[in-house]
Amino acid sequence: MSLKKRKRKAKRVDYGEIIVICEKDLKHKRIDGRKVDAWCWDDGSVVQIQKGARGKRRLRLCVHELLHVCFPEEKFPNVTESSILHAEKILADVLWAEGYRRSDNKIF
Protein backbone atom coordinates (compact mmCIF):
# COMPACT_ATOMS: atom_id res chain seq x y z
CA MET A 1 0.00 0.00 0.00
CA SER A 2 1.38 3.42 -0.89
CA LEU A 3 2.24 6.02 1.74
CA LYS A 4 -0.53 8.26 0.43
CA LYS A 5 -3.13 5.51 0.92
CA ARG A 6 -1.76 4.58 4.36
CA LYS A 7 -1.95 8.20 5.50
CA ARG A 8 -5.53 8.49 4.27
CA LYS A 9 -6.61 5.18 5.82
CA ALA A 10 -4.92 5.51 9.24
CA LYS A 11 -6.39 7.36 12.18
CA ARG A 12 -4.23 10.41 12.59
CA VAL A 13 -3.89 13.84 14.08
CA ASP A 14 -2.06 16.45 12.02
CA TYR A 15 0.24 18.92 13.75
CA GLY A 16 1.68 20.88 10.88
CA GLU A 17 4.01 18.40 9.25
CA ILE A 18 3.90 15.77 12.02
CA ILE A 19 1.42 12.96 11.60
CA VAL A 20 0.72 10.70 14.56
CA ILE A 21 -0.64 7.37 13.34
CA CYS A 22 -2.55 5.83 16.22
CA GLU A 23 -3.18 2.29 15.04
CA LYS A 24 -0.10 0.67 13.54
CA ASP A 25 0.94 -2.93 14.06
CA LEU A 26 4.69 -2.81 14.72
CA LYS A 27 5.01 -6.30 16.21
CA HIS A 28 7.53 -7.35 13.56
CA LYS A 29 9.55 -4.10 13.59
CA ARG A 30 13.01 -4.45 15.12
CA ILE A 31 16.02 -2.18 15.57
CA ASP A 32 19.32 -3.82 16.48
CA GLY A 33 17.40 -7.00 17.28
CA ARG A 34 15.06 -5.27 19.77
CA LYS A 35 11.28 -5.04 19.44
CA VAL A 36 10.00 -1.55 18.62
CA ASP A 37 6.76 -0.13 20.12
CA ALA A 38 6.96 3.22 18.35
CA TRP A 39 8.77 4.59 15.34
CA CYS A 40 9.61 8.02 13.98
CA TRP A 41 10.40 8.21 10.29
CA ASP A 42 13.80 9.70 9.49
CA ASP A 43 12.27 12.86 8.04
CA GLY A 44 10.09 13.34 11.15
CA SER A 45 6.92 13.46 9.09
CA VAL A 46 5.34 10.32 10.54
CA VAL A 47 5.25 8.94 14.07
CA GLN A 48 3.84 5.44 14.42
CA ILE A 49 2.62 4.11 17.77
CA GLN A 50 2.05 0.41 18.48
CA LYS A 51 -1.55 -0.63 18.07
CA GLY A 52 -3.12 -1.25 21.47
CA ALA A 53 -0.75 0.97 23.49
CA ARG A 54 -2.79 2.58 26.28
CA GLY A 55 -2.45 4.84 29.30
CA LYS A 56 0.89 6.05 30.55
CA ARG A 57 2.78 3.70 28.21
CA ARG A 58 1.17 5.38 25.18
CA LEU A 59 1.97 8.83 26.58
CA ARG A 60 5.61 7.83 27.04
CA LEU A 61 5.82 6.42 23.51
CA CYS A 62 4.33 9.61 22.03
CA VAL A 63 6.61 11.89 24.05
CA HIS A 64 9.67 9.81 23.17
CA GLU A 65 9.01 9.84 19.43
CA LEU A 66 8.07 13.52 19.40
CA LEU A 67 11.41 14.29 21.08
CA HIS A 68 13.06 12.56 18.12
CA VAL A 69 11.03 14.83 15.81
CA CYS A 70 12.12 17.92 17.78
CA PHE A 71 15.78 16.87 17.94
CA PRO A 72 16.66 14.99 14.72
CA GLU A 73 20.09 13.36 14.72
CA GLU A 74 21.31 15.24 11.66
CA LYS A 75 20.66 18.63 13.28
CA PHE A 76 21.42 17.68 16.90
CA PRO A 77 24.21 15.05 16.81
CA ASN A 78 24.96 15.51 20.52
CA VAL A 79 21.45 14.45 21.59
CA THR A 80 21.83 10.77 22.43
CA GLU A 81 19.17 8.10 22.89
CA SER A 82 19.88 8.16 26.63
CA SER A 83 19.16 11.93 26.63
CA ILE A 84 15.88 11.29 24.82
CA LEU A 85 14.97 8.56 27.35
CA HIS A 86 15.78 10.87 30.27
CA ALA A 87 13.68 13.74 28.88
CA GLU A 88 10.84 11.34 27.97
CA LYS A 89 10.62 10.02 31.52
CA ILE A 90 10.56 13.49 33.07
CA LEU A 91 8.03 14.94 30.61
CA ALA A 92 5.70 11.92 30.64
CA ASP A 93 5.79 11.60 34.44
CA VAL A 94 5.00 15.30 34.92
CA LEU A 95 2.21 15.28 32.32
CA TRP A 96 0.73 12.13 33.88
CA ALA A 97 0.96 13.59 37.41
CA GLU A 98 -0.81 16.73 36.15
CA GLY A 99 -3.70 14.60 34.93
CA TYR A 100 -3.11 14.58 31.18
CA ARG A 101 -4.92 11.61 29.66
CA ARG A 102 -6.01 10.62 26.20
CA SER A 103 -9.65 11.27 25.45
CA ASP A 104 -11.56 9.55 22.70
CA ASN A 105 -13.87 12.54 22.40
CA LYS A 106 -13.53 14.01 18.93
CA ILE A 107 -13.27 17.78 19.18
CA PHE A 108 -11.76 18.47 15.76
Image (cartoon, helix red, strand yellow):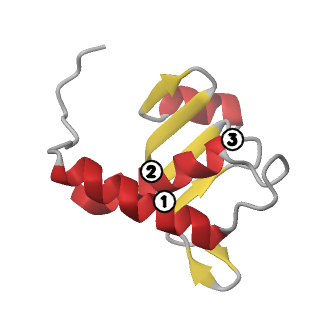
Q: Is 60 rendered above or below residue 22?
A: below
Q: CA distance from mark 3 to mark 2?
A: 13 Å
Report the disc number at residue 63: 2
Task: Answer with mark 3 or mark 1, whichever residue precedes in sequence.
Answer: 3
Q: Nearer the viewer, mark 3 or mark 1?
A: 1
In the rendered view of the protein, which quadrant contains the N terminus? Answer: top right
Residue that extends furthest to the top in the rendered view of this protein: 108
Q: Which residue is mark 1?
A: 87
Task: Answer with mark 3 or mark 2, whichever residue precedes in sequence.
Answer: 3
Q: Quadrant of residue 84?
A: bottom right
Residue 37: % across, % down: 48, 66
Residue 4: % across, % down: 67, 28
Q: Tag 2's secondary structure? A: helix
> Which residue shows up at 49% across the image and 38% down it?
20
Task: Answer with mark 1 or mark 2, whichever residue precedes in sequence.
Answer: 2
| Amino acid under disc 1 | Ala
Of 13 and 82, which appears nearest the observer?
A: 82
Number of callouts in the render?
3
| Amino acid under disc 3 | Gly
Residue 98: % across, % down: 17, 45
Report the disc number at residue 102: none
Report the disc number at residue 44: 3
> Which residue shows up at 45% across the image and 31% down it?
12
Labels 1 & 2 near each other (Cβ < 8 A): no
Labels 3 & 2 near each other (Cβ < 8 A): no
Of 6 and 59, which appears nearest the observer?
A: 59
Q: Nearer the viewer, mark 3 or mark 2?
A: 2
Q: CA distance from mark 1 to mark 2?
A: 9 Å
Of 61 and 67, which appears nearest the observer?
A: 67
Q: Tag 1's secondary structure? A: helix
Disc 2 crowd, CA 10 A, few/some/many (<14, 14-19, 20+): many
